[in-house]
Image: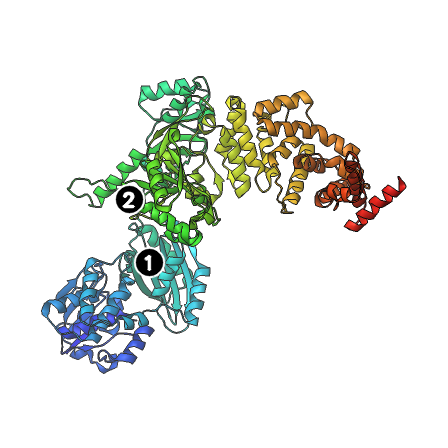
Amino acid sequence: MEVITSHINADFDALASAMAAKKLYPDAVIVFPGSLEKKVRDFVDSFTPVEIKRIKDVSLSKVSRLIIVDTKHPDRIGHFKELLSKSGVSIHIYDHHPFNKSDIRGELEVIEKVGAVSTIFAEIIQKKGILLTPMDATVLCLGIYEETGFLAYPSTTPRDLMAVSYLLKRGANLNIVSNFLKTELSTEEFSLLNELIQSLKEVVIHGVMVKIGRGTLEGFGDIAHLAHRVMDMEDTDAVVLLVAMADKIVMVGRSRIAELDISQVMAEFGGGGHPFAASATVKETPFDVLEERLVESLKKHIRPLKVAKDVMTAPLIVIQYKGALKEAEDMMTRYGVNVLPVVKKDKYMGIISREVVEKALFHGFARSRCIDFATTDAFTVYPDTLISDVEASMILRNQRFVPVIEGEKIIGAITRTDILRSMYEDFLRKGRVINRELVREPVSVSGRNVSKILKERLPADLYEFLRMAGEVADDFGFGVHLVGGCVRDMLRGVENLDIDIVVEGDGIAFAKKIGEKIGAKVRVHQRFRTAQVVLPEDTKFRAHGSKIDVATARTEYYESPAALPKVETSSIKKDLYRRDFTINTLAVRLNKKDFGVLIDFFGGQRDLKDKVIRVLHNLSFVEDPTRAFRAIRFSERFGFKITRHTENLIKMAVRINIFEKLSGARIYDELALVFRETNPVKTLKKLGDYGLLKVIYPKLAFSPALESLLQSVHDTISWFELLFLKEECDRCIVYIMAFLHKLNREERKLALEGLNVPEKPKEKIVNGLRAAEEIIKKLRPDDPVSIYHLLEGYDIETVLFSMALTENSEKKKAISRFLLELRNTKPFLKGEDLKKLGIPPGPVYSEILKKILDEKLRKRLKTKEDEADFINHLLFKS
């Protein structure tokens, strides 16, 4: 008698393998040593793909051949274990699990490293030309799909895909496969999953994280799919679940790293499986004892990962923090290094690169201290930091030199060369080095495609425009990217329709071609290789803005600190590197082939996620001091934090008086942008905290009185803008009045000259400051006529500043009454009407109309007839 069997609690791979084995051993009977998994049992009840005998119907004494599928562990075949030592019984084994010492050995052993035993049988059946019915093919597909997680588990091989292809040709029904492999949880399974998740205990061994969960299930059930769910939900290297069922504990393990072969762990408990998925069953062992044994087994089988001290370069050449930049340059040249750690005695302080040193020397800072230009917040690691974590952080942060710190002392460093050497050694160890020429493949810095986000968050016609821009660039053979605040804010979930495009090629030619296609004018700025596409009134794109900015990808250098940059054409990476902060360095590829691919060279996504403002290099504020104003403005606008290192660089720029080299016009422009923020007072206060208000004028400081006045200005302007009047107020003028209010006349003059304020705004500021004091002094809130004639001749900025300046609420109400009501009061009667009334033309007209106006302001005259009666009364009296 021939018997085909498998393991206890048979799954679809066991069922399919047994059914297929029946094709090879037609006289054999199929007998499972235990129960079927519930979903397998439901399938068999629905379709009866093959006859299955009960074990009580088989006499072990009559068995001459035992065909074992999907296992070879003696403890997993139940009562059939008795046949292993019986003479005259031939053992045939078909399995895909690797051999362990305690495994059954057979007369015939077909052991293949594939994702499922069903694959092995599909190949054999195909080779022998055995006929398969569509149901046979469906069952084998069930076995392969279940065992490989729909061909997604790491154990999947190309042979599994080829087997599925063959089975589909034989009529396999994927609807049935999908229905029976659905992973919806029953109430009991959901409760068990929740219990397992709540009980998870984290164990870290040799840098490998394993999570161990406990649970209890009434009766019997399949928990393998729960292990996959836990792995998907948890950030861990491996999971082991311990589930009590009746008188036993089922152990299910999953591993996603090569350093832990989970089948070796399960083998110690009488189980087995694959390196990435295995299980075991243990009887009469308490949870606590079993978990202790499990942890000891994990310690034995987890291979230690490399750590920083295994890879780092040591000892290092260092420079003291007071060392001059010229000394750093000499040391770099002498020792052939590109980065120097900066220390204070033995204490690590930061790192400084050759690029920073050379730029600083170029700007004349040869005698400055290294610490002033060092990167003080560079990513550092401990000696026992996993090398995989170091690799990931170096790529994420674009950092080529990572200090290894022990206590406060730097004991070594990891460079890109060290990482490459470590990777090469791993390749050699794992036998993965192939004897062929290395091929340089293009690498995407991000790989993330955000085209769906573009489509969701941009108006349809604007999205269409970007698609068209990519096609135009393709015609030229140019690379083209969407850059700037639009990309940044899109990833923040905030609308920003300011479209900035950078072209790797001739940006001006590109812009002209775009202009031709949509009938738009193009303004060209040849010096900077930029252009503006001015959208025509009738184009559908006009609704979202009046222009599109186009620039040629460029790099820039500064001939002196705070000077305007010199520009040269370059790559997109260089173009993004010249920007102010990492969050503004993100770009989206628009070319058709890679449309929507996000480019992130400098960690912009990370800093958006962490909500921080970070400069790209240590000379950022030396080359362009206005970036300090922008850092604070963005920080307050977005609610982001300025990184400690960036703060240190701002303070250093203030300390070395770099802002003295900045033209007043550029400071004025930055202040104007600050004043346009939703709530500029916080930004202005932060500017004061950093000492940047002194850049406007040395005597300016952010005092409580100034803060109160600025807040009053903000409240007043906000109130006025909410009136939605056609009249516009120049915010900049009103805020500068507030800043200069406490200065004397000469100091105001010097401050305005220093800011290089344009002539018309300067005149308004000077006259407004002088007038505001007089207005507040003379204003009589109870007299509308007085209010009107006092305020009527002044510009809106002076009136609003007066309203903000006064602390008297009645006077504030009087000014608001003027703006809302009094200033719009006009007589109905005109000169022509007076002439019709018989009054001879002359200066008397002005006097009469003024008297009418005064009476109207006092609300004594409401109609034209009232005004005429008033004139008649005047004439009668005279």
Q: Extreme right residue here?
A: 877
**Which corner quadrant of the image does residue 483 belong to?**
top left
Pick the residue in front: 449 or 778.
778
Q: In the image, what residue occupies the spot 56% across and 32% down?
A: 671
Question: How dense is the environment of label 2, judged by Cα within 10 Å: few (below 14), some, or many (20 and up)?
Answer: some
As drawn, 864 above or below 367: below
Residue 288 percent coordinates (x, y)? 42, 60
Residue 441 appears left or right of 205 = left
State the CA–CA distance, disc 2 to disc 1: 47 Å
Q: In the image, what residue occupies the spot 29% across and 40% down?
A: 478
Pointer 2 with pointer 1, Cβ within 8 A: no
Pick the residue in front: 520 or 470.
520
Q: In the image, what residue occupies the spot 30% across and 37% down?
A: 419
Q: What residue is shown with label 2? A: 474
Residue 847 percent coordinates (x, y)? 80, 36
What amino acid is labelled 2 in the image? Asp
Q: How many marks?
A: 2
Pick the residue in front: 660 or 769.
769
* N-terminal label among 2 and 1: 1
Q: In the image, what residue occupies the spot 52% across and 43% down?
A: 638
Which image quarter is the N terminus in? bottom left
Q: Quick check: can you spot residue 675?
A: yes
Residue 635 percent coordinates (x, y)? 53, 39
Pick the residue in front: 294 or 860.
860
Helix, strand or loop at disc 2? helix
Which image quarter is the C terminus in? top right
Q: Quick check: can you spot residue 597?
A: no
What amino acid is labelled 1 in the image? Arg
Residue 701 percent coordinates (x, y)? 64, 28
Q: What residue is shown with label 1? A: 254
User: Colour mode?
Assistant: rainbow
Q: Extreme left residue here?
A: 128
